[in-house]
Image (cartoon, helix red, strand yellow):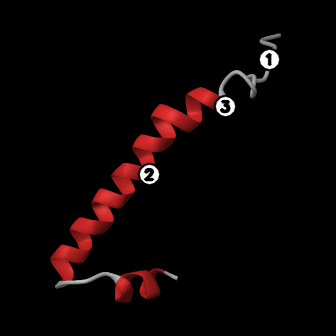
Amino acid sequence: MYAALWRLLPGPWWVRALILIVLAAAVLYGLFFYVFPWISPIVLPAEVDLE
């Protein structure tokens, strides 16, 4: 899967690496600022019993 993605990207290896870093940062940004806040009221943390 990663080899196919690597072959699809244009440019030399350093441009491909830069594109992948930017894409990973965009995915993380979307998760932290849109997905996780939206889902946090739905998924309640487990109650911890300290006894």
N-terminal of the pair, mark 1 or mark 2, is 2
The structure residue drawn at horizontal position 80% and vertical position 17%, both measured from the top left corner, is 47
Q: How crowded is mark 1: few (under 14 residues within 10 Å), some or many (20 or more)?
A: few
Residue bearing the label numbered 2: 27
User: Could you tell whether 35 is left or right of 49 in the image?
Assistant: left
N-terminal of the pair, mark 2 or mark 3, is 2
Residue bearing the label numbered 1: 47
> In terms of secondary structure, where does tag 3 sit?
helix
Is label 1 in contact with label 2 (beta carbons under 8 Å)?
no
3D distance between C-alphas at marks 1 and 2: 30 Å
**Tag of residue 39:** 3
* Residue type pointed to by label 3: Ile
User: Closer to the observer: label 1 or label 3?
Assistant: 3
Give above or below for 21 relative to 33: below
* Residue type pointed to by label 1: Glu
User: Could you tell whether 29 is left or right of 10 in the image?
Assistant: right
Query: Based on the displayed image, in which of its 4 quarters is residue 37 positioned?
Result: top right
Q: How crowded is mark 3: few (under 14 residues within 10 Å), some or many (20 or more)?
A: few
The structure residue drawn at horizontal position 25% and vertical position 71%, both measured from the top left corner, is 17
- Give percent across and percent down for residue 31: 50, 42
